[in-house]
Image (cartoon, helix red, strand yellow):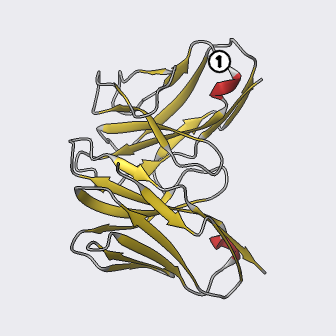
Amino acid sequence: KNQVEQSPQSLIILEGKNCTLQCNYTVSPFSNLRWYKQDTGRGPVSLTIMTFSENTKSNGRYTATLDADTKQSSLHITASQLSDSASYICVVSDRGSTLGRLYFGRGTQLTVWP
Amino acid sequence: EADIYQTPRYLVIGTGKKITLECSQTMGHDKMYWYQQDPGMELHLIHYSYGVNSTEKGDLSSESTVSRIRTEHFPLTLESARPSHTSQYLCASSDSNDNEQFFGPGTRLTVL
């Protein structure tokens, strides 16, 4: 069964600190992995998209890594800000159908305190 | 910011009412999607469309229906709302290459 598991489920950090969120998946065949940020009551917004051949990709203070061999990804947030408080969702796409089906994790709820 | 819009943003209605959730995108995307998301849970695909006059059911069984008469418009209808339909409904679209799905802001539906 194709699955996406994220850890931790929730995380509280102080403003200015760094943090790393984890994503493990079993989706096969793999097409790409995406990290989304979802603010409360809003739709998800894409942060990064990585294909099989990409090991790391950055978007400002967000850096995602991908190990396609171990089927693991991480999202590192540097110098956190209050506005980083949100749910971070790992999404994996397969190549098993023309739909390019997406498999969603449940997200890590990040809270940044002043 | 993605050019995909959903209305209404919040809706509180009584049981048995018929409702339509609107979704429009101005990016010319062929593919559109409806997801259902409960608090703290993952998104579940309930409907998708490859293009005009194409609609398919997703992974999660839903009593809602959709239509795709125009490329930019993908409304979702519930003929008779029930409390079990209370959830957040997210609309998304992508181009033919599925490079990225762009999400709307969502509709928070509460059925009393």
Q: Give the residue furthest to the front.
A: A1
Q: Nearer the viewer, residue A56 or A25?
A: A25
Where's residue B12, x and y in %? 75, 28
Residue at 38%, 33% in the rendered image: B72
Look at the picture and state if B37 lies above or below B68.
below
Where's residue A48, x and y in %? 40, 68
Residue at 53%, 49% in the rendered image: B42
Look at the picture and state if B72 lies above or below A43.
above
Give the quadrant of the C terminus of chain B: top right
Where's residue A64, x and y in %? 41, 76
Residue that mark 1 sits on: B81
Where's residue B104, x and y in %? 51, 45
Residue at 52%, 55% in the rendered image: A44
Q: Quadrant of residue A13?
A: bottom right
How crowded is the residue under tag 1: few (<14 C-alpha within 10 Å), some, or many (20+)?
Answer: many
Chain containing the residue with disc 1: B
Residue at 49%, 34% in the rendered image: B23
